[in-house]
């Protein structure tokens, strides 16, 4: 650089905000500076990355910071101030992290990159066959993080002292492992071993594991965010044994396979392949469309959840075993997955025949994320490893939002922190009825708050006072305002916030369909059209209520809902015929008494009722949503998915399914195939709710329609509703779950909006 051209306008301090730590951003800036003749320095701090830059190409330098950033980086803002130039910097250097606290994002774990995988498979490389190879573009991040900033001493890699060769790579700015905090090799990093009954077995751990899997054994495998339980996905007997030991009767198992293996069992579209190969390494739901695998992997469903190997350990194991593997959470059903070696030995001893272990500690317990693709975009069913702790920008109007903590719901739990114009929605934390899950939930709230330097001034929770999360919120609030949010209003607000609907943009009509939530009138809601925004709502329409005879039992046993709905439709005789093996008269007495039989407008229970009528999961669901998922799978087999929609009556804001059940009964008596009835049910429900929402928009009482609630994780229903609303603006979920996993985001923005508006 010609020093004579430097003047006071050629020195800049550049602040880069976003996901810029742990992604190789500083070496990227260093290399960019070398190419452009820029001098100065770059360092991490609590707000992201800071750069002091001197040169004559600073405009181009700033542009390249965003256009050429590393693949794992996400830049939210680049802010520049002109600096007075004192002494000319001699070079461009990378300096150590500065400051305390955290205003920046933390990078999620990332799947093994092609360069590292090539090393692991190359006998000439020193990391050949090494299960823990990583660089700045891949490997563990959040799962090993103990504190901020993201430096090695703040991770569970701190106890592994780097050898001279790794240290040389770590300190060379031109190397792709420059300041790669998980850097390791066989000489200095974590090690892998195979054990049975607590005893390490000598030999190659990968080969020993592969051999046992081929023999039909069940293995516990330590991954990034926790242990998995694995078996040969082609072996129906091994799958049945895993179900029995894990106490997971019918819920689908996830599968891990290479792309060629997955292509053998399903037709993958280019978009599905893109999602599969995303660095987040999520489980992707794919149709069962080619060479079949055992039905007991996902009984009654039309899809299988597939994930690619995302660590060198997984790649090496799949190379050795040469078959698809079941890869399910390492736990007994309902409990959090194991993350520590002693914990796994204790919890999984009655399930696993052997263990593939390593000695790198897992700090953050993270389930794999689960996603699907529809023609309308991504659908997030479970948000976990690979996606968290990425943040969401708040909508316009929330610039002055206070720091808020929102505790979400009881099932599919997650909490949310608002800070600095962003929302941090936690990973999936499970069903809080389980004591271990509840304990973990509380610990993770504390952990997130510490990691992200969060100090709330407002607390939000569900309206229902008996939820554990509501009770925790009340206990934690102290002198802070406690905002209790109606369940379905929170769903609506979550959809608005995800789509960055501005605070002052006006009301929308929200179609909110889910299992249940306490309504503003004290009854149980679950099939609603709400018109509102962040600040309030009114209930414009709702599904006609039916008794939940037996209370919680009605959520587990679909036949109960079928009898209630058929009785309402004047079809008690048909109910007696269909459900002759169940105690119908006793059920009716309970419903008539009103004791333990609250009225509910739940769309989820309506799905259960129709599923039971069609003979699907009639007696008892082994997992939440089983009947509805089987009903969707059945509907997808219909030759014309839309067919003739079953009719719903609509009067005075009530959507009544009596005509629907009467029409189905006519079809049933005339031998219409069950799949046709399932499709007509979906179409009728979609048409009814879309029509009610359309009325609000066309009358000028709403500006768009928002779709939320767990029922909208049914891709068939989502597609049908969108077709019936095709000429109206519609907001849907593509980045957070439509189910209760997104509830805390809605609670948080409602609480923030009330504070901003002085409510």
Image (cartoon, grey):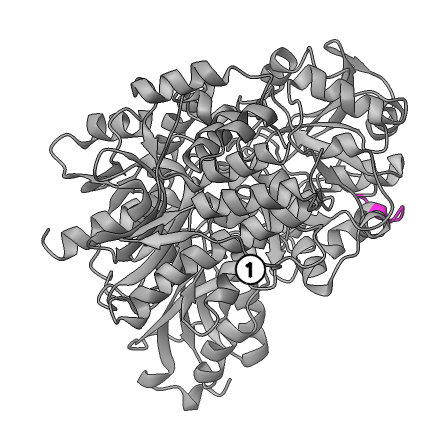
> From what the image shows, is residue 332 above or below residue 534?
above
125 to the left or right of 271: right
> From what the image shows, is residue 632 above or below residue 11?
above
Image spot of residue 731 (x, y percent): 42, 63
Q: Pick out the residue farthest to the bottom.
A: 5
Residue at 50% across, 24% down: 556
**Residue under pointer 1:** 719
Image spot of residue 332 (x, y percent): 60, 19
Q: Is residue 229 magenta?
A: no
- Magenta residues, start to end: 121-127
* Most common secondary structure along the magenta stretch: loop
- Residue 109 lies in quadrant: top right
Q: How many neighbours does mark 1 have within 10 angstroms: few (below 14), some (14-19), or many (20 or more)?
A: some
438 to the left or right of 703: right
Q: Determine the secondary structure under disc 1.
A: helix
* Whether residue 694 is visible: yes
48 to the left or right of 161: left
Image mark count: 1
- Residue 474 lies in quadrant: top left
Camera-nearest residue between 165 and 209: 209
* Whether residue 46 is visible: no
Camera-nearest residue between 40 and 521: 521
Image spot of residue 23 (x, y percent): 55, 55
Image spot of residue 313 (x, y percent): 75, 37
Residue at 89% across, 46% down: 123
Camera-nearest residue between 58 and 285: 285
Camera-nearest residue between 176 and 331: 331
């Amino acid at each position: 650089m010609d020093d004579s051209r430097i003047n006071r306008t050629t020195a800049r301090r550049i602040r880069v905000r976003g996901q810029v730590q742990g992604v190789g951003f500083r070496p990227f800036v260093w290399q960019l500076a070398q190419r452009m003749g820029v001098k100065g320095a770059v360092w991490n701090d609590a707000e992201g990355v800071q750069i002091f830059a001197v040169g004559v190409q600073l405009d181009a330098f700033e542009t390249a910071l965003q256009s050429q950033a590393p693949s794992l980086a996400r830049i939210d803002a680049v802010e520049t101030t002109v600096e007075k130039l004192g002494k000319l910097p001699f070079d461009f250097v990378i300096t150590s992290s500065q400051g305390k606290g955290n205003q920046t994002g933390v990078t999620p774990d990332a799947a093994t990159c092609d360069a590292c995988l090539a090393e692991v498979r190359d006998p000439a490389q020193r990391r050949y066959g090494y299960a823990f190879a990583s660089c700045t573009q891949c490997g563990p991040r959040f799962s090993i993080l103990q504190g901020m900033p993201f430096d090695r001493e703040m991770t569970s890699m701190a106890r592994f002292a780097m050898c001279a060769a790794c240290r040389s790579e770590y300190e060379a700015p031109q190397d792709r492992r420059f300041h790669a905090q998980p850097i390791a090799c066989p000489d200095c990093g974590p090690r892998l071993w195979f054990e049975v009954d607590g005893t390490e077995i000598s030999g190659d751990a990968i080969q020993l594991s592969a051999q046992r899997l081929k023999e039909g054994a069940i293995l516990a495998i330590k991954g990034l965010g926790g242990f998995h339980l694995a078996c040969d996905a082609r072996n129906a007997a091994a799958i049945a044994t895993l179900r029995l030991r894990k106490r997971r009767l019918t819920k689908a198992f996830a599968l891990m396979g290479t792309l060629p293996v997955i292509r053998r069992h399903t037709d993958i579209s280019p978009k599905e392949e893109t999602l599969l190969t995303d660095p987040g390494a999520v489980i992707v739901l794919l149709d069962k469309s080619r060479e079949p695998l055992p039905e007991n992997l996902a009984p009654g469903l039309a899809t299988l959840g597939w994930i690619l190997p995302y660590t060198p350990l997984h790649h090496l194991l799949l190379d050795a075993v040469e078959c698809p593997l079941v890869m399910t959470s390492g736990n007994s059903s309902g409990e959090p997955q194991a993350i520590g070696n002693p914990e796994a030995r204790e919890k999984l001893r009655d399930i696993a025949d052997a263990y593939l272990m390593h000695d790198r500690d897992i700090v953050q317990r993270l389930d794999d994320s689960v996603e699907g693709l529809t023609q309308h975009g991504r659908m997030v069913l479970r948000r976990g490893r690979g996606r968290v702790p990425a943040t969401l920008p708040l909508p316009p109007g929330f610039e002055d939002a206070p720091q808020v903590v929102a505790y979400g719901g009881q099932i599919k739990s997650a909490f949310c922190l608002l800070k600095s114009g962003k929302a941090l929605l936690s990973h999936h934390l499970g069903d809080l009825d389980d004591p271990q899950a509840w304990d973990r939930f509380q610990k993770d709230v504390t952990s997130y708050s510490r990691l992200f330097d969060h100090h709330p001034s407002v607390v939000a929770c569900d309206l229902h006072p008996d939820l554990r999360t509501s009770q925790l919120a009340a206990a934690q609030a102290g002198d802070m305002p406690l905002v209790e949010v109606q369940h379905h209003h929170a769903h609506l607000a979550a959809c608005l916030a995800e789509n960055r609907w501005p605070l002052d943009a006006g009301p929308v009509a929200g179609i909110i369909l889910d299992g249940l939530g306490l309504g503003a009138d004290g009854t149980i809601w679950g099939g609603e059209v709400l018109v509102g925004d962040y600040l309030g709502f009114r209930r414009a329409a709702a599904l006609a209520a039916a008794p939940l005879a037996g209370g919680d039992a009605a959520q587990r046993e679909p036949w109960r809902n079928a009898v209630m709905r058929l009785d309402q439709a004047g079809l008690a005789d048909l109910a007696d015929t269909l459900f002759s093996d169940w105690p119908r008269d006793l059920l009716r007495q309970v419903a008539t008494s009103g004791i333990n039989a609250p009225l509910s407008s739940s769309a989820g229970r309506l799905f259960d009722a129709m599923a039971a009528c069609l003979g699907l999961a009639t007696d008892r669901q082994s997992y939440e949503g089983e009947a509805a998922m089987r009903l969707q799978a059945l509907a997808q087999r219909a030759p014309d998915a839309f067919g003739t929609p079953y009719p719903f009556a609509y009067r005075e804001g009530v959507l009544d399914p009596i005509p629907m059940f009467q029409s189905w009964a006519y079809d049933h008596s005339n031998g219409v195939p069950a799949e046709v009835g399932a499709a007509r049910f979906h179409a009728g429900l979609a048409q009814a709710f879309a029509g009610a929402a359309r009325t609000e928009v066309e009358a000028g009482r709403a500006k768009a329609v928002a779709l939320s609630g767990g029922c909208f994780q049914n891709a068939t229903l989502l597609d049908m509703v969108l077709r019936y609303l095709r000429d109206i603006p519609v907001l849907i979920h593509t980045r957070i779950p439509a189910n209760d996993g997104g509830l805390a985001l809605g609670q948080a923005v409602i609480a923030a909006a009330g504070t901003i508006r002085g409510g």
